[in-house]
Image (tube, grey):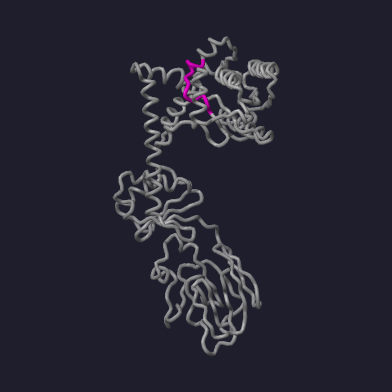
């Protein structure tokens, strides 16, 4: 096993002799095997052990065992005694989840404090299979069969290609000792139940069941990687981004095989789940304009011919603008410089900016979100138009409408911010002074 382990390290470029690592060591067979392999290969490491105080004298014995082993080999060791039950109660989470949070937080604390080059974990092939089957039982997509990675961030798992049986044989052959965790024999926990009862039953169905499962999962993992590459190309080709919004034409997804999966991969970074992706895909058969799906922080809208992804905006509090010669206006969509100045007869035609005849305005002005029923007279017209109709005319996406704001003078709208000023507020040859909004 030593030769195979060394070959694996070289092939995957997992560990090197110029670095110092942190070995997570419970005192069990797996971590003690890994510690011995590292020592024989001359890999420098420190040890970290957490006493979760869940098994009484047994937990104390594990700690003493690890401390004695590290002291004998002159390996620096870091110990944490954790009140796991109290932590779980405070957080309102399970004991297993509490232990996980405590574990990884302390590992990272020690790694960072001592500037170590990685955290080495003793997960092996059996752990990998258990993880994949647990993912399948919970309900998962193709990434659920990836299991644990050899390396993820600072976490390194060099034993993944090796089975529990191989590790046990290595320990027996080399007459190495370890601590047994009695809780591993209890089938109360789902993982233990799967390991003790579920997987042996599956392995017993075919002579090569275990080997075939590992091969199948590797092929599915490779398929997943291929899909990820194809998805990124599809996304780059079909999804347009503009001013914080993303747009996907119906035509780019309606006829695509696996539309719900494409939608899920697009939307999951924004908090949408696979069930929502499936519902959106079903909705594309006969799109209902205005239909909306929400995650914690984002909206997906069915617009006229496309899906529009946008962030959920916080409620906007109206801003009052006094009659000052120079000031700044900060809006969610950007910052404006406001000046009241003499009109030099040069018009700024940038739609993001506005030049208004100051003599026609009634201060203080107000900027607020537009409301149903709001009307204004668009520049170049002599009759009023509802803001809602105006936004439809200029094809503002439904999702973006929630962010549109108006500048109000008295009871009249002088400017649909960033889009169009009102005709009555425009500059004319008779204009002497202007209120100038310039986005900066």
**Residue placed at 54% from the left, 30% from the top?**
14
The C terminus lies in quadrant: bottom right
Closest to the observer, 71 or 283: 71
Residue 161 colored in magenta in the image: yes
Dividing the picture into quadrants, the one containing residue 60 is top right
Count numbered badges in the picture: 0
**Residue placed at 37% from the left, 43% from the top?**
261
Dividing the picture into quadrants, the one containing residue 61 is top right
**Residue placed at 49% from the left, 66% from the top?**
404
10 lies left or right of 104: left
Instruction: Answer above or below: position of 289 versus 224.
Output: below
Query: Main SS of the magenta segment?
Result: loop
**Residue placed at 60% from the left, 15% from the top?**
179
360 lies left or right of 398: right
432 lies left or right of 249: right
Q: Position of residue 97 (x, y in %)?
A: 56, 31
Q: Position of residue 334 (x, y in %)?
A: 56, 64
Residue 240 colored in magenta in the image: no
Q: Position of residue 234 (x, y in %)?
A: 37, 49
Q: Position of residue 57 (x, y in %)?
A: 66, 15
| Span shown in magenta | 157-167
Instruction: Answer above or below: position of 323 versus 95.
Output: below
Instruction: Answer above or below: position of 390 versus 80.
Output: below
Q: Residue furthest bottom?
A: 430
Closest to the observer, 82 or 290: 82
Instruction: Answer above or below: position of 437 versus 247.
Output: below
Dividing the picture into quadrants, the one containing residue 275 is top left
């Amino acid at each position: 096993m030593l030769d195979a382990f060394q070959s694996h390290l070289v092939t995957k470029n997992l560990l090197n002799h110029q670095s110092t690592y942190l070995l997570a060591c419970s005192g069990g067979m797996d971590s003690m095997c890994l510690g011995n392999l590292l020592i024989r290969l001359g890999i420098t490491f420190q040890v970290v052990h957490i006493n979760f105080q869940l098994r009484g004298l047994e937990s104390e014995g594990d700690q003493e065992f690890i401390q004695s082993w590290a002291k004998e080999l002159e390996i620096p060791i870091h110990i944490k005694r954790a009140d796991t039950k109290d932590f779980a109660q405070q957080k309102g989470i399970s004991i297993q989840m509490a232990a996980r949070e405590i574990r990884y937080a302390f590992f990272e604390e020690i790694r960072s404090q001592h500037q170590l080059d990685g955290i080495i974990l003793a997960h092996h092939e059996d752990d990998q299979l258990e993880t994949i089957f647990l993912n399948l039982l919970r309900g998962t997509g193709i990434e659920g069969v990836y299991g644990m990675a050899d390396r993820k961030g600072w976490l390194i798992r060099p034993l993944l290609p090796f089975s529990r049986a191989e590790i046990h044989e290595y320990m027996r052959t080399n007459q190495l000792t370890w601590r047994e965790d009695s809780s591993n024999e209890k089938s109360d926990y789902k993982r233990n139940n799967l390991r003790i009862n579920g997987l042996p039953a599956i392995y017993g169905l075919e002579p090569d069941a275990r080997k075939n499962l590992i091969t199948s999962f590797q092929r599915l993992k490779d398929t997943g990687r291929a899909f990820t590459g194809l998805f990124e190309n599809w996304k780059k080709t079909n999804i347009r981004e503009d001013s914080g919004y993303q747009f996907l034409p119906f035509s780019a997804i309606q006829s695509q095989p696996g539309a719900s999966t494409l939608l899920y991969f697009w939307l999951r970074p924004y908090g949408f789940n696979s069930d929502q992706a499936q519902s959106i895909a079903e909705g594309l058969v006969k799109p209902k304009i205005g239909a909306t799906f929400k995650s914690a922080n984002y909206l997906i809208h069915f617009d006229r011919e496309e899906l529009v992804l946008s962030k959920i905006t916080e409620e906007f509090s109206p801003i009052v603008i006094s009659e000052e010669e120079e000031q700044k206006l900060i809006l969610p969509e950007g910052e404006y410089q406001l000046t009241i100045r003499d009109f030099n007869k040069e018009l700024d035609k940038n739609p993001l900016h506005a030049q208004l005849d100051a003599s026609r305005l009634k201060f203080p002005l107000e900027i607020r979100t537009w409301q149903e029923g709001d009307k204004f007279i668009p520049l170049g017209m002599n009759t009023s138009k509802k803001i809602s109709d105006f936004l439809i005319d200029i094809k503002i996406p439904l999702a973006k409408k929630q962010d549109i704001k108006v500048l109000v003078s008295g009871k009249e709208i002088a400017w649909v911010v960033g889009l169009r000023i009102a005709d009555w507020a425009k500059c004319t040859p008779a204009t002497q002074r202007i209120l100038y909004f310039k986005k900066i």
